[in-house]
Image (cartoon, rainbow, N blue to C red):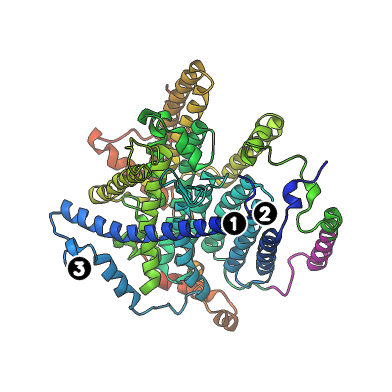
Amino acid sequence: MGDPLFSNGVGLAVWIIVVVKVLLAFGFLMVSVMLMIWFERKVISDMQNRIGPNRAGPFGILQTLADGIKLFFKEDLMPDKADRFVFKLAPYLTVLPAFLIFTLVPVGGVVTIAHHVVELQVADPPMGILLLLALSSVAVYGTMLAGWSSGSKYPLLGSVRASAQMISYEAAMGLSVAAVILESHSLSTRAIVAAQAPHFWDWGVFRTGVVPFLVFFVAVTAELNRPPFDLTEGEQELVGGFHTEYSSIRFALFFLAEFMNAITMSAIMVTLFFGGPDGPGFHFVRWLWPILWFLGKTLVFLYGYVWIRAALPRLRYDQLMDLGWKRLIPLSLGWLLVIAATSINAVWGFSVLGGGIVAAGVLYQSLRVSSRRREALAMEGGLGRAGRLASHQVQLRSVPDGPGAPVVTGGGTSEGGGS
Amino acid sequence: MSIHPAVLAATIPDSITFAIAAAISVIGALGVVLSRNPVHSALMLVMTLFGVAVLFVEENAQFLAAVQVIVYAGAIVVLFLFVIMLLGVDRREVTERDPLRGQRAVALLLGILGLVEVILLAGGKWPTGAHSAAGAINVTGRSNVALLGDAVFTTYLLPFEITSALLVIAVIGAVVLARRPRQAGDREQPQIGGGDIITADVLGPDSLIRPEIEEATGSSDVHEELDKSSFERSDP
């Protein structure tokens, strides 16, 4: 800790170990992306009663490799109106954060190689998990610039959607990470994992009371533009989203980043909430078991992502924004307060919890009143398109109720704050 | 006050890192001023921010480095880009005339003054000015982040809370100013928040409008025409 530049000098062995760790992590990610794409296609095929890729290699496992080679040899196109430099830069800005986030993840325990104690993770900087937030905010640039620099309208619309979505959900994600930090008293990922160590009921998911995990899971899914939050590439609306104009190896980079992100974020979730490499081990090959536990847990989340993709339909844009701003952010903020109060004592904890529930009631009421007023205004033609969309939603909801909700005009907000 | 040992041990890797990061920041800063295209300027600003973040890490201020990237690169410049992309300011701007008279001369003067001040303050201690820190940044066994947290939430709690209140006031003020109460029967207005009304200016670097066409016609007719032709959509 401290001394980030090794001002006091380092031996050759340390250099070699660091280089080997970086190369291993890179290789691991590349291979796992290859397997992940195959896995996703196979599982979705199973769920849809199809066979899926089955030609290249045993069970079609080499299909991704074949696709990669094909992409590599395709013609590389660039639109006339593209901003040449930014167009070339954008794919790398998408891939780099995905890889760099993975360097934070503790894959296993500690091993000793030639008298050097080596942590099985590429880097353990003191700012630790803050780097996750920093890098995921850098990832916005790739998407945003890819869409803009293509000089074409569908990519632009896709990238505006994508970056608005990513920025919105970053807040909820950061707040649920803060809950974990509050429990583990450290930013360093290794310390966060160590704080969840002895039993499985010490895992972050239980210590923070499940809610931050759920918020984090949803926020990350939105952050990665995975289904059901893949509005950025809604095929029916936007052709292919922000990467419509990309082809060949540059497109492959976006594809790579998408799946690498899924793997990285699953690994981060395991690290933050499920004890990382924690799990029962045996006395022979002691270093192996933590790694296996880590991989197993990550695989569960990867399967979860694929399952969600197969099962859920895409959200509408206003639903997406409502979920992020009106539900997830207040929820994670309130839960953070509850956790902070609980760590003082139980009385504080329960009173803040009670206060939070009352506040949630008030918030719910005010949202309802606001949507009714929007509906009333929309009826009179006083709102823009966004307003009409929202009122459309209200009407859809109130259909089973019969003649619809009473139209509230002007100041008819007397039912607000009922709790 | 004694000089921090890390400074004394500032060896070759330290200097090399400093040189690279400093060069990146300076090149980025020049790029912000000299780029013709506002989006390129914004990207150059990001580059400068990253260079400065590396310098923070070098000075052992890890938290500051992370916050620099999260807040400035991750939020503020993204907002700049949003504004540039959505409001279509990315046409080449006329840079011959200044909006404020004498702007350049004053800027140059202030810049030189600032540089002189920094050089005087640094007092010839290159590359890491040792007497800048008010205390040891690294007590053994406690990270910079923990110490900073302690300081902010104990000694400097009041300034911290006042700052956060200020930010909340700013946010609420912006919302109040932006949302004037709507009367029923108001004309429909283009809303950026609605997400689907965008002018032709947004479209990409050259934004469909070639500068020469604009110069030739000398009017904004081109905009309107393109507006109509490229954005016909069936209104429900």
Q: Which residues are magenta?
A: B95-115
Indicate which label's residue lies in the foreground, 3 or 1: 1
- Disc 3 marks a residue whose amino acid type is Ala
Q: Which residue is mark 1?
A: A11
Residue A293, numbered label: none
Q: Chain of mark 3?
A: A
Q: In screen coordinates, is B41 left or right of B123? A: left
Residue at image point 82% right, 61% down: B115
Q: Earlier in the sequence, mark 3 or mark 1?
A: 1
> What residue sits right under mark 3 in the picture?
A56
Asked if the stretch drawn in magenta spans residue B102, the answer is yes
- Using the image as rendered, state which of residue A379 and residue B195 is in the foreground: B195
Distance CA(mark 1)–CA(mark 2): 12 Å
Q: Main secondary structure of the magenta part?
A: helix
Q: Return the residue at label 2.
A: A7
Determine crowd level at label 1: few under 14, some 14-19, many 20+ residues with C-alpha closer than 10 A: few
